[in-house]
Image: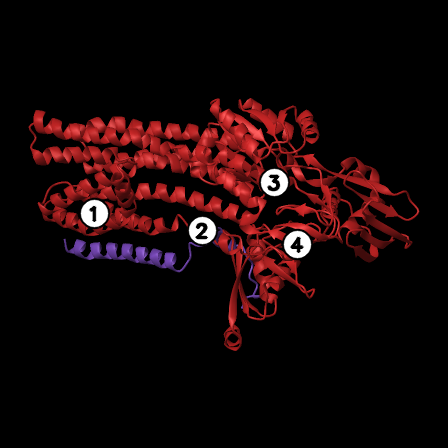
Chain colours: A purple, B red
């Protein structure tokens, strides 16, 4: 039982952390341009052009 | 660096629409190219909306940015205010989906230990924990359904959300009661999972609509919404269409569309009215002639005095007619709603019957009877049913979109599946709607002459020159070397051609002196003049597409606003029957007659004159090159030249509906198995959770077969 008292808060805490991260992503506009996000990873950035 | 610059000059943000961006390469080119423009501090592309947002100094103007993008090979337009992206449908659903997912997973974790035998104080603790996570999550994530169900009940109607809301509320209430009294079974896990699956279905449905709308909006924003206005003192200024007022004089260059109705003040030209009337032959017009918004100026620059703008134009008349035409569509009831009309009363009757049965016949007591009735409600909650339609439609729309066919919403697919009659507009739909050079003459030109023609044409923005460049470049012609290229507006191009031996010959690509057809003349000194005729051509693959339509049991005919002669020619070439010289009202009435005879009509058209017909038909499709009105009124928009899109879309829609019906059978079949168990009082939360997930997974797997629906 003492194990549970430790493990359940840990499990819930991790879940809540994930949920908070999701909400943060939602608020900071990371779901605004899904196609662009998928394509952006393919852009080569060889240290040029970016401010 | 950029921070220092920001401190020096006030920054402005401009949003430009760049419809030509498709991939990572385009994004990088646009972002880096704009960043190199002096005064621009940052540029960020939104690929979904096909827009780029530019942060720049106040000194940088929009035309400068458009020009910079043009130099990179991306035509761009400032975003029109009224076309700002509509509020997304999927975004408000994401947060409830996340909460439902989090809560369902954590409660399931606790439930698993109860199912595997936790008892006594541990079980009570887990029930309390589940309630602490579950109740707020259910209230938050279930709001979508509660609000919609309440809205329906208030008006004395019922929808899919009513049984969901009742089931969720009762199950939550019972679970709370069980938790407080230390009972054996709580249903928080099943309730949350139900909400998760249903929200996933909703979110998919909304995501599909968002995606299609983004694609169509990107096309819509391409339309040139304005004109160059000539002031009294000779200054020229670009004004957006809503700012045009009667009395202004606008200068319309060759290749531009008129932004308002008016009267020609000076200049002579040929005008293409096909978008407005369906008339394919260009008409010549000079000072004093009346011209309409939407007309394409083909030959040379004209000055037009605006007589009507915005709401006063012929366009507005057509828009009024369209408003009155959308009845067939507003009467249509989506299949999910039709199903729930039958389903909701059946479910509630079953639950009430099992409650009464156990109370009266089974002498089970109030508590036990209530538990059984609620188990029936939960097990019959339309979880798989809620996924049955949206998942199938999302997969099919994704497949169609990959083939360049954009579907505006799911109900369009449902209506398209019932089609048994097609009406095709001629200009712009059966034909390409733009002048193309005669391929026989291009074949006869020979390498040298073709090279000269390509080189000359590539220096001009005239529509005929553009068409010639496209056709010759497509044939692999290499441009000849020219010197001293000169364009005389309204006349043509002239230059000196330096051939391989270094010999210089004067050459010209010009308007033919007197030609009855649309044509360009190619002069090469010392050789006979070539006359290259231009005409509108049938889209590639028309005959295969028509055969495929016949194979699907769909009868096709032509309904055109063009004159009988031009329509007859196309009718002979395609073997279709035709009705010519139909104005917008006549087109709408033709559809009304067919609908009156019990036919389901698909209208395929592009022009403004097709708008009312597109809105009146049971389903409608427009090519991507169509007018704004056409694209807005149509349910589906197809890109590319080929008419294959029609049979392909109909086939995919029918296949989608077949899968949707299979999904219903699967979802209801599961209920037929599970309901007797629930009514007999044998269903535990474990069985409910397993059955719900299994039936949802089967429905999703079945829908995924539609990935290849658009082949």
Work out how far the residue at label 1 is from the one at label 4, CA to CA, in angstroms.
76 Å
- Residue B655, position in %: x, y? 46, 29
Q: Are marks 3 and 2 on the same chain?
A: yes
Front position among marks 4 and 3: 4
Work out how far the residue at label 3 is from the one at label 2, CA to CA, in angstroms.
26 Å
Q: Are marks 4 and 3 on the same chain?
A: yes
Label 3 sits on residue: B640
Label 1 sits on residue: B110
- Residue B186, position in %: x, y? 16, 42
Label 2 sits on residue: B86
**Does the image show residue B687?**
no
Q: Residue at the spot x=35%, y=43% of the render?
A: B200
Looking at the picture, tell me which residue is in the foreground, B457 or B688: B457
Q: Are marks 3 and 2 in contact (CB under 8 Å)?
A: no
Specify few, some or many for label 3: CA neighbours under 10 Å numbering under 14, 14-19, or 20 or more: some
B428 to the left or right of B393: right
Q: Are marks 1 and 2 on the same chain?
A: yes
Disc nearer the start of the sequence (4/3): 4
Q: Residue at the spot x=67%, y=46% of the render?
A: B290
Please, what secondary structure does the residue beneath circle 4 have? strand
Q: Are marks 1 and 3 on the same chain?
A: yes
Task: Note whether B80 is above or below B275 in the view shown.
Answer: below
> Which quadrant holds residue B587?
top right
Please, what secondary structure does the residue beneath circle 3 have? loop
Disc nearer the start of the sequence (3/2): 2
Work out how far the residue at label 4 is from the one at label 3, CA to CA, in angstroms.
36 Å
Label 4 sits on residue: B305
Work out how far the residue at label 1 is from the one at label 2, CA to CA, in angstroms.
42 Å
């Amino acid at each position: 039982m003492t194990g549970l008292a430790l493990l359940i808060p840990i499990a819930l805490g991790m879940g809540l952390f994930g949920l908070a991260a999701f909400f943060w992503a939602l608020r900071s506009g990371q779901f605004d341009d899904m196609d662009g996000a998928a394509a952006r990873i393919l852009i080569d950035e060889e240290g040029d052009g970016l401010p | 660096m950029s921070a220092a610059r920001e401190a020096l000059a006030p920054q402005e943000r401009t949003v430009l629409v760049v419809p030509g961006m498709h991939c990572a390469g385009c994004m990088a080119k646009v972002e880096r190219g704009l960043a190199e423009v002096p005064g621009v501090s940052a540029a960020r592309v939104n690929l979904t909306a096909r827009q780029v947002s530019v942060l720049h100094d106040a000194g940088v103007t929009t035309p400068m940015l458009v020009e910079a993008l043009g130099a990179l090979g991306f035509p761009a337009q400032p975003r029109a205010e009224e076309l700002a992206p509509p509020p997304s449908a999927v975004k408000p659903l994401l947060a409830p989906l996340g909460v439902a997912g989090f809560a369902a997973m954590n409660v399931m974790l606790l439930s698993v230990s109860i199912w595997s035998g936790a008892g006594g104080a541990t079980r009570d603790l887990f029930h309390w924990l589940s309630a602490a996570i579950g109740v707020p999550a259910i209230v938050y994530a279930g709001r979508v359904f509660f609000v919609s169900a309440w809205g329906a009940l208030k008006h004395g109607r019922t929808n899919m959300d009513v049984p969901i809301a009742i089931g969720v509320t009762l199950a939550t209430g019972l679970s709370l009661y069980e938790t407080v009294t230390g009972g054996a079974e709580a249903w928080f896990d099943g309730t949350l999972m139900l909400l998760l699956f249903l929200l996933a279905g909703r979110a998919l449905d909304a995501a599909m609509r968002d995606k299609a709308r983004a694609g169509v909006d990107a096309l819509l924003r391409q339309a040139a919404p304005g004109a160059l206005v000539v002031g009294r003192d000779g200054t020229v200024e670009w004004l957006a269409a809503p700012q045009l007022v009667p009395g202004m004089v606008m200068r319309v260059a060759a290749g531009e569309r008129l932004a308002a109705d008016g009267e020609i003040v000076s200049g002579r030209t040929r005008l293409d009215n096909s978008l407005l009337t369906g008339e394919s032959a260009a008409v010549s017009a000079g000072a004093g002639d009346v011209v309409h918004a939407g007309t394409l100026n083909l030959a040379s620059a004209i000055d037009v005095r605006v007589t009507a703008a915005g709401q006063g134009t012929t366009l507005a008349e057509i828009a009024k007619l369209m408003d009155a035409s959308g009845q067939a569509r507003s009467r249509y009831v989506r299949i999910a709603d039709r199903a729930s009309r039958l389903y909701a009363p059946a479910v509630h009757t079953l639950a009430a019957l099992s409650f009464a049965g156990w109370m009266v016949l089974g002498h089970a007591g109030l508590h036990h009877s209530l538990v059984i009735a609620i188990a029936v409600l939960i097990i019959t909650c339309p979880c798989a049913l809620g996924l049955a339609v949206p998942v199938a439609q999302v997969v099919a729309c994704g497949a169609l979109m990959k083939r360049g066919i954009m579907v505006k919403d799911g109900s369009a697919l449902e209506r398209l599946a019932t089609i048994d009659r097609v009406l095709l507009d001629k200009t712009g739909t059966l034909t390409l709607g733009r002048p193309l050079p005669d391929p026989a003459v291009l074949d006869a030109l020979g390498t040298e002459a073709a090279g000269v023609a390509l080189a000359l044409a590539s220096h001009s923005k005239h529509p005929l020159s553009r068409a010639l460049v496209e056709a010759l470049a497509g044939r692999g012609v290499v441009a000849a070397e020219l010197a001293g290229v000169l364009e005389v507006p309204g006349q043509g191009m002239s230059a000196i051609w330096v051939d391989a031996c270094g010999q210089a010959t004067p050459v010209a690509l010009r308007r033919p002196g007197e030609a009855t057809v649309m044509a360009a003349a190619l002069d090469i000194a010392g050789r006979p003049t070539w006359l290259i005729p231009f005409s509108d051509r049938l889209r590639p693959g028309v005959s295969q597409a028509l055969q495929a339509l016949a194979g699907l049991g769909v009868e096709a005919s032509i309904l055109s606003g063009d004159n009988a002669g031009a329509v007859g020619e196309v009718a002979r070439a395609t073997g279709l029957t035709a009705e010519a010289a139909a104005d917008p009202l006549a087109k709408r009435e033709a559809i009304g007659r067919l609908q009156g005879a019990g036919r389901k009509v698909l209208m395929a058209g592009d022009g403004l004159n097709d708008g009312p017909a597109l809105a009146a038909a049971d389903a409608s499709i427009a090519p991507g090159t169509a007018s704004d009105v056409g694209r807005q009124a149509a349910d589906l928009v197809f890109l590319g030249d080929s008419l294959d899109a029609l049979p392909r879309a109909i086939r995919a829609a029918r296949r989608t509906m077949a899968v949707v019906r299979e999904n219903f059978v699967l979802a209801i079949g599961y209920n037929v198995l599970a309901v007797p168990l629930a009514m007999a009082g044998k269903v535990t939360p474990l069985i409910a959770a397993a059955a719900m997930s299994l039936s949802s997974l089967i429905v999703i797997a079945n829908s995924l077969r539609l990935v290849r629906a658009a082949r």
